[in-house]
Amino acid sequence: MRQDPIPTAVADRLSAAARRLRDARRTALDRVAVAETEWEYADRTWSWPAGEAMTYFRELAPGEREVLDGLIADLDGLGEAESADGPRADSGAEIVGIGTGRVAVAIPGSAREGESESADADPLVAKLARYGPSAEMGDGRPQNRRERRIWSAVESHPFLPVLDDGSGGDWIAMPRADVPPDEPVREEALERVRAALAPHRDRFHFDELKPENVGAYRGRYWIVDYGRPAGDPLFVDPPGEPSETDPNANDPTETDPNASENPQDRSHKS
């Protein structure tokens, strides 16, 4: 499952794009900032520069789209340079997902010139962190850092592997899974991932177990988004307590000391 790290030329472009992405959202929010930035919901106080209207919270701000278009052109340009002697075998870079804190961009294999030619080389996705005034409201860097930490500690199914990352959580790279599972097998996929997550109930927030966060990769179903801490109140039931024979029942590594990082309400997609 291991692959070569993201080549330097690609990593540099991802890091630069992530910084510009945060600057663009911050600038756009400054332009629409309102005086009343706080509101109450679910017994909590929430804050966003544009207030309860939450402008640019779920959708891309105008400047963000331009940054992403530039990144896609850069990645495709790298791929064209590497495939100048023959036709490209893969599709180009593209946006494959937009969340409140991160944007997922497919990295074409032809742009990863540093990788060895191997049948094990999978299509990859980079999750670029967006700007937010706090970890719980739009800042994607804590999510990236947390997914990196979890994968480094577990390195096993059902957590989709984190293969490389940028400084400070600017971006992480993962295999590209087919998300969500096809409708006929969707419930089965969710149940399989739910069962596989049972030993990790202290690492994973089970509100995040939903079709858009589960994907097929190498013949198995994986959780593709696990950056939300498990310490928040749950709106769905996690698996039951482990049995006395569960080898992970008393594993101290299952407790995440950073559980307070990046709490989110269920009404906000991570």
Image (tube, helix red, strand yellow):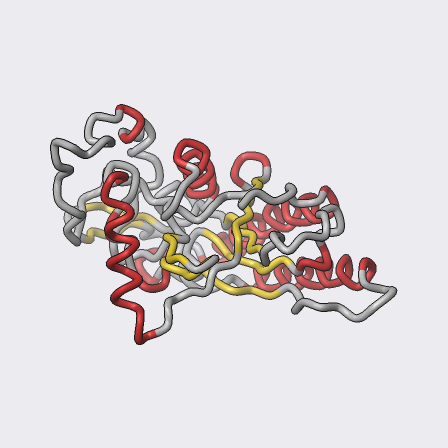
> Residue at the spot x=75%, y=68% of the render?
88
82 horizontally vs 50: left or right: right
**Residue 14 in the image: x percent, y percent?**
64, 48
- Residue toward you, 167 or 156: 156
- Residue toward you, 235 or 6: 6
**Residue 248 in the image: x percent, y percent?**
24, 31
**Residue 100 in the image: x percent, y percent?**
41, 56
> In the picture shown, does residue 90 fall above or below 171?
below
> Residue at the spot x=34%, y=56% of the render?
51
146 horizontally vs 242: left or right: right
165 horizontally vs 190: left or right: right
> Residue at the spot x=27%, y=29% of the render?
255
Q: How many marks?
A: 0
128 horizontally vs 160: left or right: right
- Residue toward you, 79 or 33: 79
**Residue 253 in the image: x percent, y percent?**
31, 26
